[in-house]
């Protein structure tokens, strides 16, 4: 813990001689007292952590009226033995303001100051005058939230325009500190904005030398790009390769797809999941045939009007196929940009994506090949600025302009907060076997896994006796339960807790379609949610 504390203080770059002296003194006290400098009873003073909170536009600040100092001021508190100084600053900011939507502006220390604390009372207990070695960070609070004071420490919490800090703060020695924090947070913001125009040149040069040989990159045919982009949603590149080649070989154009037999289409897609994608692809192909004479539209607004095509896919197709300045912002691009900018906002929110789209749109206008830039941004996220594990900064062409690399916060980003609670359902799935064939049936034409094949099932986990009764109700005349297995399948918003019951039957019920395992494999598309029981 002592080394972590020392490393954090060492990373601070002083702007003034006074700050350099404060940093040197704090490091001296760490050498002298070790982690005891984090405790209130350290004889030479102790570390406190403050957060200077500003609005996202950096025009206003949150100030709390402190009962001890009889003045408005920043939030903060004692380290109390914890070496996570930024974490302390965030915790104190949330406690003192009741803010929920609050996050770091940067992980960099903005200032180290030695602050004298006058004698006062804390919870009725006298506290002698002492020194705070205060480490301050910049924080951002969203304005659409209610603020409330911490009753035992503060009287009120207010938003103030930064120009009015000097009017409301009666601690004259603090005003220069607040002013320099505003200046430094704005300087970091300017550093971020300056990143954008420097992205394209090194990234495109890198992509030309390092791009992977992927089958859908061999031309810029809109049909090929569209098929690949739909397949690549929620599916890994290595999985998609073979599916893509089979699909294009059997369904080479929009007309073929529009009139392709549905069962065979499902079979081609089997194993990739998210079957609504391929249903929508066929409907989209039919739309292209009827509304656009069998040609993929060129206008961005028309592409967005296609069934199953969202902002990302439209951006990818219009930039790659038509050279338009339409960014394609997927998970890879969100991660790369959050790290490049050291942006701690939730990247899954629409405001973040919209701002990124506008800023990247200006970058696109400066390059000759918009499609190559789209693919380069996605490629670097997939192979260098990777989602799991440490990014490969040593081979990244953007390392020199990466703000999070400078702050050493790469692995803290991006912030992805999904507010999705999966519903849990218990199911019993029946594997009826009769004369070497098993029973399947068609799912309803609407809803989850619409129109696909499935094993017979019932809600809830059935006992052996109840399973036998259900088999009889389906006219299966089961005479033996071979085995029972437990499986789980997870959808985006739903999780199935499955009990699989394997039963021998004397006669095939007319309620179901009976197929051999070979027929099932060759002709019928059985989703993974059901296939997992057979496996």
Image (tube, grey):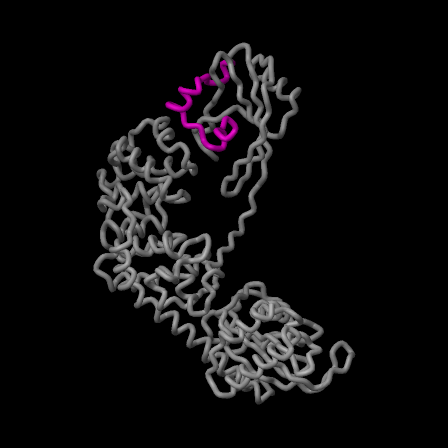
Residue reaching furthest to the front: 31
Image position of 464 with respect to 138: above or below:
above
Q: Is 307 one of the magenta-colored residues?
A: no
Residue 446 appears anywhere in the view: no
Residue shown at the point (37%, 33%) measured from the top left: 269
Regarding residue 293, the answer to whether it shows in the image is: yes
- Picture layout, residue 322 above or below residue 83: above
Depth order, front residue of 436/123? 436
Q: Where is residue 534 in the image (x, y as percent from the top left)?
A: 50, 26
Task: Work out which residue is located at the far right of the displayed protein and give it.
Answer: 124
Picture coordinates of residue 191 (x, y %)? Answer: 38, 73
Quadrant housing residue 62: bottom right
Quadrant in which the N terminus is drawn: bottom right
Q: Does the magenta stretch include residue 526?
A: yes
Q: Is 502 situated left or right of 125 in this image? A: left
- Against 458, is 230 above or below? below
Identify the residue shown where x is 49% and y is 32%.
Answer: 529
- How many numbered discs sit on the rendered protein? 0
In front of the other: 254 or 402: 402
Q: Residue at x 43, y 60 (%)?
A: 351
In the image, the segment drawn in magenta is 509-535
The percent position of residue 461, horizontal first and vertical second, equals: 63, 29
The answer to whether residue 482 is above or below residue 257 is above
């Amino acid at each position: 813990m002592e080394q972590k504390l020392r490393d954090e203080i060492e990373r601070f770059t002083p702007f003034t001689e006074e700050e350099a002296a404060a940093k040197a003194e704090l490091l001296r006290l760490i050498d002298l007292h070790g982690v005891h400098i984090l405790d209130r009873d350290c004889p030479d003073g102790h570390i406190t952590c403050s957060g200077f909170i500003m609005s996202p536009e950096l025009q206003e600040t949150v100030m709390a009226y402190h009962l001890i100092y009889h003045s408005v001021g920043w939030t903060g508190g004692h380290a109390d033995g914890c070496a996570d100084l930024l974490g302390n600053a965030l915790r104190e900011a949330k406690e003192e303001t009741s803010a929920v939507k609050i996050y770091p502006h940067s992980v960099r220390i903005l200032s180290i100051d030695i602050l004298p604390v006058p004698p006062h009372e804390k919870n009725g207990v006298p506290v002698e005058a002492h020194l705070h070695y205060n480490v301050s960070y910049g924080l951002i609070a969203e304005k659409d939230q209610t603020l409330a004071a911490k009753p035992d420490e503060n009287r009120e919490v207010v938003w103030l325009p930064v120009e009015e800090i000097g009017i409301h703060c009666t601690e004259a020695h603090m005003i220069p500190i607040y002013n320099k924090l505003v200046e430094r947070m704005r300087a970091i913001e300017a550093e971020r904005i300056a990143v954008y125009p420097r992205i394209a040149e090194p990234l495109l040069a890198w992509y030309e030398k390092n791009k992977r040989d992927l089958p859908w990159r061999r031309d810029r045919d809109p049909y090929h790009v569209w098929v690949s982009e739909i397949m690549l949603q929620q599916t890994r590149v290595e999985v998609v390769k073979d599916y893509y080649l089979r699909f294009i070989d059997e369904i080479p154009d929009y007309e073929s797809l529009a009139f392709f037999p549905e069962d065979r289409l499902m079979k081609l897609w089997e194993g990739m999941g998210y079957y609504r994608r391929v249903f929508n692809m066929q409907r989209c192909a039919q739309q292209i045939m009827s509304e656009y004479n069998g040609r993929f539209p060129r206008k961005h607004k028309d592409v967005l009007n296609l069934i199953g095509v969202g902002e990302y896919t439209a951006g990818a197709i219009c930039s790659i196929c038509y050279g338009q300045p339409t960014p394609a912002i997927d998970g890879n691009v969100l991660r790369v940009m959050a790290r490049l900018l050291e942006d701690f906002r939730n990247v899954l929110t629409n405001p973040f994506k919209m701002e990124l789209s506008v800023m990247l749109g200006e970058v696109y206008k400066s390059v000759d090949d918009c499609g190559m830039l789209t693919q380069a941004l996605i490629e670097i996220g997939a192979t260098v600025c990777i989602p799991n594990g440490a990014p490969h900064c040593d081979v990244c062409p953007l390392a020199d302009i990466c703000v999070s690399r400078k702050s050493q916060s790469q692995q803290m980003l991006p912030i992805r907060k999904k507010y999705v609670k999966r519903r849990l359902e218990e199911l019993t799935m029946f594997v009826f076997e009769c004369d070497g064939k098993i029973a399947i049936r068609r799912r309803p034409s609407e809803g989850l896994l619409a129109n696909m094949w499935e094993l017979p099932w019932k809600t809830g986990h059935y006992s052996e006796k109840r399973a036998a009764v259900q088999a009889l109700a389906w006219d299966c005349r089961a005479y033996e339960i071979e085995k029972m297995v437990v499986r789980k399948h997870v959808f985006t918003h739903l999780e199935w807790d499955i009990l699989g019951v394997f039963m021998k039957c004397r006669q095939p019920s007319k309620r179901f379609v009976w197929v051999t395992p070979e027929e099932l494999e060759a002709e019928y598309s059985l989703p993974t949610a059901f296939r997992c029981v057979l496996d």
